[in-house]
Image: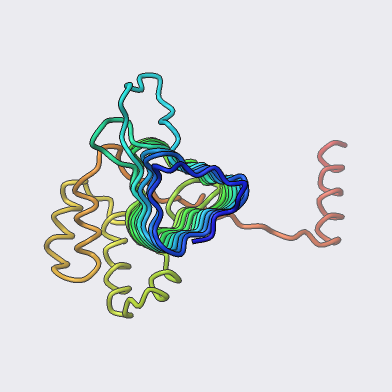
Amino acid sequence: MNIHPLAAVSPDARLGSGVTIGAFATIEAGAELGDFCIVHPGVVIKAGVRAGSQNEFCEHAVIGGAPQHAGRPQQIGTVVIGDRNVFREYVTIHRALKPGTATIVGNGNYVMASAHFGHDVVIGDNCICANGALLGGHVTVQDRAFVSGAVAVHQFCRIGRLAMVGGHARVVQDVPPFMLVDGQSGCIVGLNIVGLRRSGHSSEEIADLKAAYRVVYRRGLPWKDVLEALRAEFTAGPVTHLLEFLTSGSRGFTQERRAPPSTTLRIRVPEDEAAARADLKARAG
């Protein structure tokens, strides 16, 4: 264990073996850090935080702050963090709102500078949240999702497995698994094909997801019929996870971006310009 003499570590904090704590870091009473965690200078890990092994907390991150809620009770929940996560500079994670509940971060996540996780957020495994990503209270992000920079996610929304949300998007409804969200419009623009291939999905599974995408967004079916069609046409593979996601949720689902009607541009050559001027002159005279 390596604790800098200028760090403020409560004797009631629980630290695993091999923990490194930098100068001016603060570890409050009741906080727990597993083996080989690294706490860089200026980090604050507050009471009510329980972190697993091999996590890295970079400069000035604040983990375990009280929930930002006007009706916050006197007794609040906790923060539970798994293993092998990286929290870059100025990341903030808030404790859950009610006793006996937890803000949860899984394993192997990479959280970039100034990202914020509100109270009762649940993050799966191997997710990436880029700089300035803002997750409101009770947001759920499933495994291997990618939330780009400056994305704002409304309270109680869900981002499905292997979904990718483009930078600056405003997410106000659930993003289904495997989907790609355009940052400018905040709408779905297709499947996250690159993410699917990198995660080892076969060409047959991707083909099934493309077919399911057309059922959901292109057939124009009533929602009940969409779900029935998915059940009837796909009995295995990742589409079953998509169907499970679509049968739950309370905020509705992000819609597909519709392209405007196509237009035809005609390039006018000098001869056309001269003919047009002569025609206008003749009409005027």
The residue lying toward the viewer, choosing from 178 and 265, is: 178
Q: In this view, does 85 lie to the left or right of 115?
A: left
x and y percentages locating residue 236 in the rendered image:
16, 70
| Quadrant in which residue 136 is drawn | top left
Total marks in image: 0
The answer to whether residue 170 is visible is no
In which quadrant is the C terminus drawn?
top right
Colour scheme: rainbow
Is residue 67 positioned above or below 263 on the image?
above
Q: Residue at 40%, 76% (x, y): give it.
A: 197
The answer to whether residue 284 is visible is yes
The residue lying toward the viewer, choosing from 205 and 5, is: 5
Q: In this view, does 22 lie to the left or right of 75?
A: right
Is residue 206 positioned above or below 218 on the image?
below
Q: In this view, does 76 lie to the left or right of 268?
A: left
x and y percentages locating residue 247 in the rendered image:
19, 49
Q: Residue at 38%, 73% (x, y): give it.
A: 199
x and y percentages locating residue 279 in the rendered image:
81, 47
As drawn, the residue found furthest toward the top would be 71
The residue lying toward the viewer, choosing from 13 and 85, is: 13
Q: Residue at 35%, 48% (x, y): give it.
A: 50
Q: Residue at 69%, 59% (x, y): give it.
A: 266
| Quadrant in which residue 130 is drawn | bottom right
x and y percentages locating residue 138 in the rendered image:
33, 38
